[in-house]
Image (cartoon, rainbow, N blue to C red):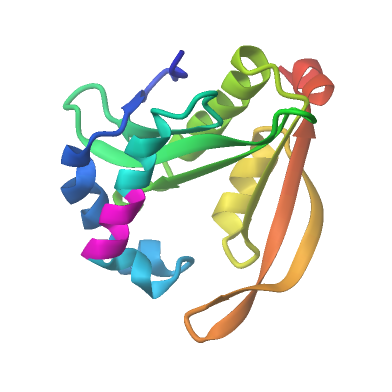
Amino acid sequence: MIPRTERLLLREFTLDDLPAVLAYHRDPRYLRYYPERRGTEPETRRLVQRFVDWQQEEPRARYQWAVLLPEDGRLIGNGGIRIQSFETMEADIGYELDPEHWGRGYASELAAALLRFGFTELGLHRITAHCVADNVGSARVLEKVGMRQEGRLRESEWMQGRWWDRLLFGILAHEWRAGS
């Protein structure tokens, strides 16, 4: 039940993944759109532990997978989908990649796989995503996979000593089916 992509391998997280995640969490290019605490060992350990803990949920509502290059098994990021409501069958997706692997189409491939998993495996009605408005690359990824910008949440995120706007994207199951 783990999504597949043409060039990436996805698998469940283990605590052994901490060093690889911490390595890219400390990269200044990655930290540009995240709170400073994201680059610390305690924060990253909590994050990876949370991903491992989600695997035991019943019913499972949150999936976060390690993303690896199949040729060498190197962890280069993660991606996931979190059901917000079983009643309305709505979820949100998120992804992050080691900056060393940006610009190769991996994020779009991953986001497309997350949407496919949500609509086909989970039977969702609606999937959303958000990104910091300044993160033009992430906004392009969401548009490329068929999501529409539904709004701009002005000054809705406090980090790095200032307020940031966030963009909200969404796609409905019938829109996804029509475009796939």
> Above or below — where is 46 with respect to 172?
below
In percent of width and height, residue 131 lies at: 61, 56
Tell me residue 17's x, y (percent). Answer: 21, 41
- Residue at screen point 62% across, 23% down: 118
Residue shown at the point (50%, 29%) measured from the top left: 109
Which residue is more in the foreground, 35 or 96? 35
Q: Which residues are magenta?
A: 41-47
Q: What kind of secondary structure does the magenta stretch mostly adopt?
A: helix
Please give the name of the residue rendered at 71% of the width and 58% of the height, measured from the top-left corner.
167
Give the vertical position of 158 relative to 94 (above or below).
below
Of 113 and 87, which appears nearest the observer?
Answer: 87
Q: Residue at x 60, y 67 (%)?
A: 134
Left or right, residue 128 beside residue 33? right
Q: Say whether residue 86 is visible.
A: yes
Quadrant of residue 87 in the image?
A: top right
Residue 14 in the image: x percent, y percent? Answer: 24, 34
Point out the residue furthest to the bottom here.
161
Image quarter where the C terminus lies is: top right
Residue 127 within the segment the image draws in magenta: no
Q: How many marks?
A: 0
The answer to whether one can see residue 101 in this image is no
In the picture, measured across the screen, residue 80 lies left or right of residue 44, that is right
Rendering coords of residue 158 (x, y %): 58, 77
